[in-house]
Image (cartoon, grey):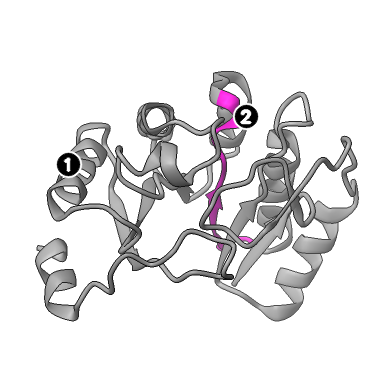
């Protein structure tokens, strides 16, 4: 199961994402880590993904909140596998290290789209190179966990740009990459440029 932490309002506004964009004003539910740990234990899950909205309104981007949730999950349910799928924390290494030091089994940060599509569809505060730097630092610091990223396709990129992105992810040490077809959540979001066929996905997999 996947749980989104730190509320439902993101401080960024990417053109592919249906999460509400706004300014939470620093509000955080301090009991959320305990509630998440309790719910996951009651459900008897074996694998949980902790994702988050971007919280540029918080000094640490919400890193301590995520790390605390990981710790409480481990206390409640030894043996549980935890994946932390985070934002870029504004490029600051200190909050990123707080999450990495909590030792998730999988650390994920999504590149989202290719280099040329980044300024077109990601929030202006996002950066292709910064995302690669986050993933590279995770690979350097995460001793036993896997590092994971994801790309959407069909949003306007060319195939050779996807291959470039895959090479970049390999260069910084990413272990796992997922590829998914972009689907437009509402007419206000970026349009679908193409539907990638199963054969094309098979080539990308190879």
Residue at the (51%, 33%) spot, across then down: 126
Tell whether 129 sits left or right of 62: left
- Label 1 packing within 10 angstroms: few (<14), some (14-19), many (20+): few
Q: Nearer the viewer, residue 174 or 161?
A: 161
Q: Secondary structure at mark 2?
A: helix
Which x, y percent locates residue 33?
80, 53
Quadrant hosting residue 198: bottom left
Q: Quadrant of residue 144?
A: top left
| Residue 164: mark | 1
Q: Nearer the viewer, residue 128 or 33?
A: 128
Magenta region, residue range: 78-90
Q: Position of residue 196 (x, y in %)?
A: 23, 72
Residue 89 forms part of the magenta stretch: yes
Q: Residue at x 90, y 41 (%)?
A: 27
Tag 1 secondary structure: helix
Residue 98, disc: 2
């Amino acid at each position: 199961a996947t749980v989104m932490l730190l509320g439902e309002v993101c401080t960024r506004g990417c053109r592919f994402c249906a999460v509400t964009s706004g300014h939470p004003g620093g509000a955080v539910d301090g009991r959320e880590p305990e509630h998440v740990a309790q719910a996951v234990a009651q459900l008897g899950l074996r694998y949980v993904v902790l994702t988050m909205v971007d919280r540029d309104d918080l000094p640490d981007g919400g890193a301590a909140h995520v790390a605390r949730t990981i710790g409480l999950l481990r206390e409640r349910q030894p043996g549980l596998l935890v994946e932390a799928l985070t934002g870029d924390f504004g490029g600051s290494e200190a909050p990123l290290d707080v999450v990495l030091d909590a030792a998730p089994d999988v650390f994920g940060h999504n590149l989202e789209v290719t280099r040329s599509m980044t300024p077109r569809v990601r929030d202006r505060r996002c950066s292709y190179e910064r995302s690669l730097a986050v993933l590279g630092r995770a690979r350097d610091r995460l001793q036993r966990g896997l590092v994971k990223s994801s790309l959407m396709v069909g949003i306007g990129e060319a195939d050779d740009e996807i291959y470039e992105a895959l090479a970049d992810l390999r260069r910084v040490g990413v272990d796992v990459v997922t590829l998914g077809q972009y689907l437009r959540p509402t007419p206000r979001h970026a349009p679908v440029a193409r539907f990638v066929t199963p054969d094309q996905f098979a080539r990308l997999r190879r």
